[in-house]
């Protein structure tokens, strides 16, 4: 929270929102990757390696924000983990924004049959160097844990995802805010005219 009551999202969330707004279709990584038995024998320095070529093709199709998230295709395990973060993160933040919009359309009240937001995320439990189990969190859960749910929204004008810096923000930017205010002004003028008749 900044001094003026504005809030800023974590960097990972900023990149996720930018990649969602890019609206490019994400290729299915599993379809592009050759048989997993070839993974053990992969030489990443070999430019003709089919796995390296597949990862480079996927990376070339991504937006700049998405490429920042997934990183270099040269490290396959990290690239795959980051790509999974990108795919699952896009669906989670989009669903968060949709649920916020539907909740505000119904005056923000949850009825008895509605549930709060939930998402299934993969977790990994490993043994640490002390011989104790430890929960490894992925980038998505680290980016989302503790965030106010109502700050990830869809713009009321253009339907782009954005981080609401202020609690009462309904639009992603100044031009959309002006359009939104103009629409509201015209609607209220129509209502006043109808009441006079």
Image: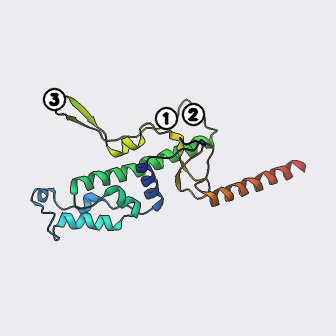
Marking on residue 127:
none
Task: Report the residue at 39% width, 63% height from top.
Answer: 64
Determine whether label 2 and label 1 are within 8 Å by CB: yes
In the image, residue 148 sits, relative to residue 55, either above or below, namely above
Which residue reaches farthest bottom?
A: 48
Determine whether label 2 and label 3 are within 8 Å by CB: no
Which residue reaches farthest front?
A: 3
- Mark 1, other Cα within 10 Å: few <14 / some 14–19 / many ≥20: few
Q: Earlier in the sequence, mark 3 or mark 1?
A: 1
Whole-number angstrom distance, CA of label 2 to CA of label 1: 8 Å
Tell me the SS state at disc 1.
loop
Q: Identify residue for label 3.
A: 131
Whole-number angstrom distance, CA of label 2 to CA of label 3: 44 Å
Q: Earlier in the sequence, mark 2 or mark 3?
A: 2
Marking on residue 116:
1
Q: Out of 187 and 61, give the one closest to the viewer.
A: 61
Marking on residue 110:
2
């Amino acid at each position: 929270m900044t001094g003026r009551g504005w809030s800023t999202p974590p960097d990972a969330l900023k990149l996720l929102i930018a990649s969602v707004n890019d609206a490019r279709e994400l290729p299915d990584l599993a379809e592009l990757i050759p048989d997993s038995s070839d993974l053990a024998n992969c030489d990443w320095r070999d430019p003709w390696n089919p796995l390296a070529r597949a990862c480079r093709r996927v990376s070339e199709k991504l937006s700049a924000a998405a490429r920042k998230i997934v990183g270099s295709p040269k490290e396959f395990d990290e690239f795959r983990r980051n790509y999974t973060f990108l795919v699952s993160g896009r669906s989670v933040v989009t669903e968060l924004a949709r649920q916020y919009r539907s909740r505000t359309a119904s005056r923000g009240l949850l009825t008895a049959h509605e549930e709060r937001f939930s998402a299934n995320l993969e977790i990994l439990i490993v043994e640490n160097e002390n011989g104790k189990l430890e929960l490894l969190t992925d980038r998505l859960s680290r980016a989302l844990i503790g965030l106010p749910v109502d700050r990830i929204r869809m713009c009321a004008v253009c339907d782009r995802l954005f981080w609401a810096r202020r609690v009462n923000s309904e639009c992603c930017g100044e031009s959309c805010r002006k359009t939104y205010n103009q629409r509201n002004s015209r609607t209220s003028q129509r209502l006043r005219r109808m009441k006079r008749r």
